[in-house]
Image (cartoon, rainbow, N blue to C red):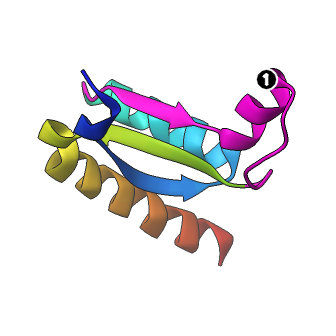
């Protein structure tokens, strides 16, 4: 599979992305975390924003994943209120 077959479905803090990735995987959706900042540091380069991590899913799972992400975001807002 090429990276072009994946789409960013959420971007935020690493903690939220990891939580959301777990929810997607429980639903049978493979998700990929893209952390340009950490990858740049590991490779010896700087780059990216330290607080923004992207969560990507395969295009075939996009509709199902969007519903899970929306529910996650709505629950996060009510938990913070």
Quarter of the image with the C terminus in it: bottom right
Quarter of the image with the N terminus in it: top left
Name the residue: 47% across, 64% down.
73
Name the residue: 58% across, 36% down.
18
Name the residue: 32% across, 38% down.
57
Question: Is 38 colored magenta in this rendering?
Answer: yes
Nearer to us in this view, 58 or 48: 48
Name the residue: 67% across, 41% down.
36
Q: Which residue is mark 1?
A: 43
In percent of width and height, residue 40 lies at 76, 34
Question: Is 36 colored magenta in this rendering?
Answer: yes
In percent of width and height, residue 16 lies at 61, 48
Q: Is residue 22 above or below residue 12?
A: above
Magenta region: 28-51
In percent of width and height, residue 51 lies at 76, 54
Residue at disc 1, secondary structure: helix
């Amino acid at each position: 599979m090429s990276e072009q077959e994946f789409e960013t479905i959420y971007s935020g803090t690493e903690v939220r992305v990891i939580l959301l990735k777990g929810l997607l995987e429980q639903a049978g959706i493979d998700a990929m975390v893209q952390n340009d900042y950490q990858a740049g540091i590991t490779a010896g380069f700087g780059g990216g924003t330290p607080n923004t991590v992207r969560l990507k899913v395969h295009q075939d799972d996009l509709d199902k994943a969007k519903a899970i992400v929306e529910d996650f975001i709505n629950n996060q807002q009510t938990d913070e209120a």
